[in-house]
Image (spheres, helix red, strand yellow):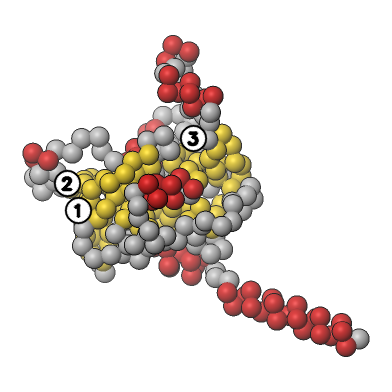
Amino acid sequence: MIKQIKAGLLLLLILAVNNLSAQSLPQIIKQVKPSIVGVGTLQATRRPPSNLMGTGFVVADGYHVVTNYHVIPKNIKAEKKESLVIFYRHMSKIKYRKARVIARDEEHDLALLRIEGTKFPALKIETKRKPQEGDSIAFTGFPIGAVLGLFPVTHRGIISAISPVVIPAPSSSTLTVKMIKRLKNPYYVYQLDATAYPGNSGSPMFNAGDGRVLGVINKVFIKESKESVLQKPSGITYAIPGKYIIKLLKQSKIIGF
């Protein structure tokens, strides 16, 4: 009887410790939001001067931002004083910092930026536990840009599948050598049941239980045209695994993650 009581007390103690260490999603979102930034360009003579192209999030030492490769504009008109920047909200004002691309991973649609100024709080990337189908996740970003102001929005769901990435081609004549190579040796991505929108590109997908980054929102499956995605979203979103973020940081010799 005494042994049973001791075992029961031990179980209660373990549950109590777990509850103390666990965080609610509202708490996690509050911690994540300061690390979320908009990625785009700024040109003082343009109207409007700012152009938000996607989302990014701060990692490592607080001076680096991860986003999608496709979010970065192909050409920055430096001769017209156009700059690559990150946007963020400070108090009630939208501010910006100049940024530069220091590393790219086009195959996995990732880019690493170095930002000017003081550092931001950085998100931690999961390095120990491998995500599984059924895991509860969330992602935070700017699904419709800054239409309603620069307010990060969080969506929640699960990892519904871990599947090889495939980019369909309209016909065999449009297949490139690069596409064929990818079809032969595909890498795996996370398929989510939460709905993302074009502005979510580059958003961190994180564990809903502890806030650690598991991947990067990469694309949403669109049933019809890009213009109709807001009215008729498919609800199928894809994320690039976090291991490719770590690889990019290691290649750039950035420590602290």
> Label 3 belongs to which residue?
221
For the residues labelled 2 and 3, the Cα–Cα distance comes to: 31 Å
Q: Could you say whether the residue bearing mark 2 is in a helix, strand or loop?
A: strand
Is residue 50 in view?
A: yes
Q: Which residue type does callout 2 highlight? A: Ser
Q: Which mark is residue 98?
A: 1
Residue drawn 81% across and 85% down?
Answer: 6
* Mark number displayed over residue 152: none
Depicted 89 relative to depicted 74: above or below: below
Q: Position of residue 110 (x, y in %)?
A: 38, 42
Under mark 1, the amino acid is: Lys
Distance of label 1 from label 3 (alpha carbons): 32 Å
Residue 57 horizontal/vertical position (percent): 37, 55
Q: Secondary structure at mark 1?
A: strand
Looking at the image, tell me whether mark 1 or mark 3 is earlier in sequence order: 1
Element class at badge 3: loop
Residue tagged 2:
83
Query: Could you tell me which residue is drawn at 23 percent across and 51 percent down?
Result: 99
In the depicted view, which residue is nearer to us: 122 or 50?
A: 122
Residue at image point 55% right, 69% down = 24
Question: In this orientation, which residue lies closer to the viewer: 153 or 114?
Answer: 114
Mark 2 and mark 1 in contact (Cβ < 8 Å)? yes
Q: Position of residue 115 (x, y in %)?
A: 25, 55
